[in-house]
Image (spheres, rainbow, N blue to C red):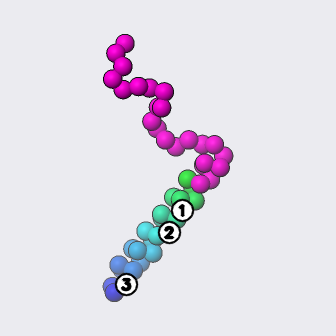
Amino acid sequence: MRPYLASFEREEKARIQRLRRDILWCATYGVDLDRRDIRSRAGVAS
């Protein structure tokens, strides 16, 4: 295996792990990262 490929894979795994940890932290403190508005209804005419 090429060293730069192994390095990339390690960095990618670490990035994903940080992302998961950050999402869990936000969920623990009630921060909603979802941008969708569940109260809006698509297709409803005004």
- Residue annotated with mark 1: 18
In the rendered view, tell whether residue 4 sits above or below residue 41: below
The residue at the point 43 percent across, 68 percent down is: 12
Q: CA distance from mark 2 to mark 1?
A: 6 Å
Is 37 one of the magenta-colored residues? yes
Residue type at tag 2:
Ala
Left or right for 27, reference 44: right
Classify mark 1: residues with Cα within 10 Å, few (<14), some (14-19) or many (20+): few
**Label 3 vs 1, first from the N-terminus:** 3
Give the number of callouts: 3
Q: Main secondary structure of the magenta part?
A: loop
Q: Position of residue 46 (x, y in %)?
A: 37, 12
In the rendered view, tell whether residue 45 sits above or below residue 12: above
Q: CA distance from mark 3 to mark 2?
A: 17 Å
Asked if labels 1 and 2 touch by Cβ distance under 8 angstroms, the answer is yes
Left or right for 8, reference 27: left
Asked if labels 2 and 3 touch by Cβ distance under 8 angstroms, the answer is no
Q: Position of residue 36 (x, y in %)?
A: 45, 36
The residue at the point 39 percent across, 74 percent down is: 8
Determine the image quadrant of residue 6.
Answer: bottom left
Residue that protrudes farthest toward the right in the picture: 29
Which segment did they paint magenta? 24-46
In this view, the mark in front (3 or 2): 2
Residue type at tag 3:
Pro
Is 40 one of the magenta-colored residues? yes
What element does badge 2 sit on?
helix
- Residue annotated with mark 3: 3
Determine the image quadrant of residue 45.
Answer: top left
What element does badge 3 sit on?
helix
Determine the image quadrant of residue 9.
Answer: bottom left
Classify mark 2: residues with Cα within 10 Å, few (<14), some (14-19) or many (20+): few
Which circle marks residue 14 in the picture? 2
